[in-house]
Amino acid sequence: MDPRSSPSRRTSLVDTFTGALARREAKSARRRLTVLPQSAADFSSNDFLSLSTSTAYRERFLAHLKDTPSSFPFASGGSRLLDGNSAYAEELEKFVAVFHEAPTALLFNSGYDANVGVLSSIPQPGDLILYDELIHASAHEGMRLSRAGSRMPFSHSSPTSLRDALQSQIVADQRIRDGTRNVFIVIESIYSMDGDVAPIKEFISAVDELLPNENGYFIVDEAHATGVFGPRGTGVVQELGVQDRMFIRVHTFGKALASHGAMVLCGPETRDYLINYARSLIYTTALGFPFLASIRAAYDLLSEGETSQVGLPLAFTNSQ
């Protein structure tokens, strides 16, 4: 008998890959990298303000590059904890924190890195995470890596479902009732697939009622609100005036701001904790100066109210 025809024949790793891709192909779910022709109409980009093709943005960005000494390195050279930090990066964090009315800000290389870093390190052993069922994949990855004791979804943008999920955990866990166990509520402010706005004020009311010991902490991802919602594009949270109630806000720059990276807005103790425990910050090469300058250029335009001249209106009106 030919051993190659035996049922016990070993399947190579490449064969496994091929089979998995074939199954995706059969379901019309196989992903491919594509390059669109310049003549194509774009109905899927996150470049909401068209900053990536804006003359005003390009001029501001190039001005930031020219204003730096020729000896200033373009590459960071390492992680921020080694030799990749700079006075420019720290000044950018302060600028963005003031813009978003936050105590401090911490720069991450992407929104994915920010969500993974926050949710993998902030929840303490045994804590509870309640999350909207439609949150970003990066948040799921962060929760998977976290030390939280349990995580539970609630129905999309449903204060009733959040209330029911939280109530069930309060009944089951004395430490949640007495305030010695933390509860994290993880949401987005704008959900990209449907464009709907989270009922943040209703969520706050439910948490305030059920957790009078103030052991509930909101983590809100404003990736799709940055630049287009709120006054000067500050986001939904500031439009509602509830920034002081959010434990952490994540604003990303690879969408409406035509750049790269993300800021975690938080208190100074939380910022210091992330610097020490968020592995997606600690063990990665920091953003180089051109990326920092592009972020600053975009925020300059937001601060000066000039984005209304280069793309969509400066801010949409929240339906809440």
Image: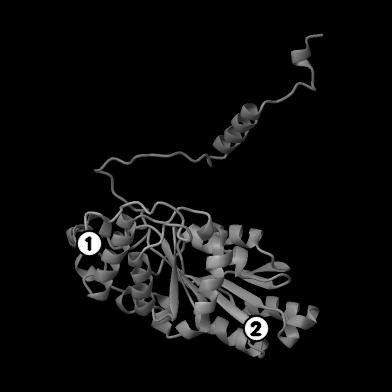
Please give the name of the residue rendered at 31% of the width and 74% of the height, measured from the top-left corner.
Answer: 315
The residue singled out by tag 1 in the image is 64
Please give the name of the residue rendered at 58% of the width and 75% of the height, measured from the top-left corner.
Answer: 158
Three-letter residue code for mark 2 = Asn
Quadrant location of the C terminus?
bottom left
Please give the name of the residue rendered at 74% of the width and 85% of the height, measured from the top-left corner.
Answer: 177
In the image, 84 versus 303, the foreground residue is 84
Q: For residue 76, what is the image quadrant?
A: bottom left
Residue 134 horizontal/vertical position (percent):
56, 63
Picture disc at residue 46: none
Picture disc at residue 215: 2
Residue 229 horizontal/vertical position (percent):
36, 74
Q: Are marks 1 and 2 in contact (CB under 8 Å)?
A: no
- The kind of secondary structure element at disc 2 is loop
Residue 63 horizontal/vertical position (percent):
18, 61
In the image, 6 versus 22, the foreground residue is 6
Quadrant location of the N terminus?
top right
On the question of residue 161 being in view, the answer is no
Left or right of residue 162: residue 54 = left
CA neighbours of label 1 inside 10 A, class few (<14), some (14 to 19), many (20+):
some
